[in-house]
Amino acid sequence: MRSSLIRRGVWAIGVAVLVIALAVAALPLIASTRIVRDRIAWELSAWSGFRVTIDGSPRIEVWPKFRAILSDVTLSQWTETEMPPVVEADRVEVDLSAMAALQGDVAFSTARLVRPTIRVQRTASGFYLPPLPTGGRITRSIDTARGVVSANPQKPDLGRLPSDPFGTVEFRDGRVVTSIDGKDTEILSSLNGQVNWEAMNSDASLTATGIWRGESVQLDFSSAKPLVLFAGGAAPVTLSFKAAPAIFSFDGTASMSDNAYLDGQAKFLAPSLRRVLEWSQAGIAPGAAIGAVSVSSKVNASAGRAKFENTTVTLNNNPGMGALDFSFAEGRPVIAGTLAFDTLDLRSFLSAFTPVSPTGEAGLGDIDTSFADRINLDLRLSAAHANAGPVQLADVAATAQVKNGLAVFDISDASAFNGNIQSSLRFDRKPEGTQVEMRLLASDVDTGAFATAAGMTRLVPAGTGTVSVILKGPGKAWNSIFENADGSFSATFGPGTLNGLDLPAFLKRNQQGGFFALNDVANGSLPIDGAEIKASISKGVARLDKAEINAQKYKIWLSGIASYVGRGLALSGGVVPNGQPAQQPQQTNGQAASPPPPPPNQSLFFVGGNWSAPFISPIAPGVSGQ
């Protein structure tokens, strides 16, 4: 009896195995007869909302999984029959349900697009997106969700959302193209990734990699309520974009309604701002380029405008805090706000928005001011410590403004050289060419330290003084600014010393006659009560209108011209005892005339050569240095 039961059980198991084996073996035959190409195309169309066509015959595989392999697949809009397909794929692999196939149905959970081409169009917002389907389960689900959101925008009833299955869509070795002048232009290549969305009312995620503008990029997106998001409601969103030039991330709430907005925390990191500007093809010449830049901020964006609050900005490892406002006006990005730094490299910051040449790069080329037509900028800056080349500043208040062909950078207040500094750099694009204006006012500064920073180490009074420089001229190239600029220079000095001049030795050599180098009488210093210099500047040449140095016993005066481009000198001067008027030469046709015979005890001389190696030529012996 027992053996009989065993034999019956073995027979039952054998029959079951045989049935299963026959069913599996028959699947390709069943698929080839009942799951025909049109049935699969219909199901894909009903799922996607696009008109799906399959040119090749389906191939059915049973192992290792039951799937259909489709070739030459296209997805097109139903209403645009003359337009190229939205998606073309060399091959589509669809994972099928074996049980559904045995019942004559098509049910799939995963679709793999191999070598797809996705066509996108530029929207009014500037983004490139594929055309939307006009029907299908996805569109119907979104329409239903839109009604749920409209009923209660603040807190939609998630239980009423459609629960239609979606599944997983993978894409391999794809590309994204757009039509320009009737030809497909590739935007993205080597596209790989997948969309995971089990059901329409569940969470969803997208992961994609590709090559954009020659750089490998990775995009990660996820949302706990994607259907609410697509229906125009507010939903949590996490977004991450990674590439070698820049990294961007966002974590917060988003809405894709007519009043679309973002509200959350955003982060941006770039090893080189120059590289980002070049890669983004923003049309802004990255003449200078801050190096590393990072931004972390709470962002609220809507209707073409983004506000960044509690913003932390780090430029070349210099952290700052503030608030920024981004918007668009007349097709240009508009950036406004305030930033406060502990330390800041002004030259590096300025060169990111103006054509200032960075340190170590050629600075004599043409000036590119086209950036001023592509961006509007209005920034208020402050820094506890800053540097502008060799100049160290403290308590800096500055502004950077760019608008309609005009670029202005002002330091309205700063402490330096134990005094106060104000400066301005202005680029103004006009029909006749770019005009450049430079202004500097240094008040109550240590003139010795100021002169050293300016590269002037000879015969500059050391003490406290005020210096003013104004230059204005055409700005086609950097060298042309100084060669063609007009303006003025003035300086007043208080009590101090004139280093680099042994006045008794100078007077003795001048009385003896003959040429001699100023270096020969430079081992000394002269205490002075004050000095004043006024000069007018024309085409790169400074003409001394007044130059007097008052010492305890003597007054020294100079007159003539000095080139600050070629650094040449053509001066006449004199040393006269205090209380005796100086006999300066008269100007004739723009040239210094020969001086009249000196009064008693006045020593006259010419100064020639250049700034670095001037020489003295006595005119007439006069006062003795003894």
Image (cartoon, grey):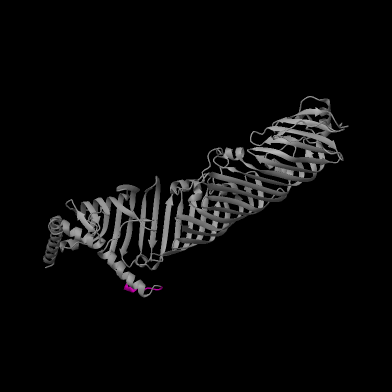
Mark yes or no: residue 67 visible: no
Q: Residue at x 76, y 41 (%)?
A: 461
Indicate the quadrant where residue 567 lies: top right
Indicate the quadrant where residue 574 lies: top right
**Is residue 150 shown above or below 281?**
below
Whether 158 is among the magenta residues is yes
Q: Position of residue 28 (x, y in %)?
A: 15, 55
Q: Extreme right residue here?
A: 626
Mark yes or no: residue 69 visible: yes
**Is residue 213 shown above or below 98?**
above
Quadrant where the N terminus sits is: bottom left
Q: Which residues are magenta?
A: 154-160
In-image side of 87 versus 568 (left or right): left
Q: Who is closer to the viewer here, 502 or 602?
A: 602
**Is residue 17 shown above or below 429?**
below
In-image side of 151 versus 417 (left or right): left
In-image side of 442 versus 280 (left or right): right
Q: Who is closer to the viewer here, 3 or 201?
A: 201
Q: Position of residue 284 (x, y in %)?
A: 48, 48
Whether 500 is among the magenta residues is no
In-image side of 148 versus 69 (left or right): right
Quadrant where the C terminus sits is: top right
Q: Position of residue 141 (x, y in %)?
A: 29, 67
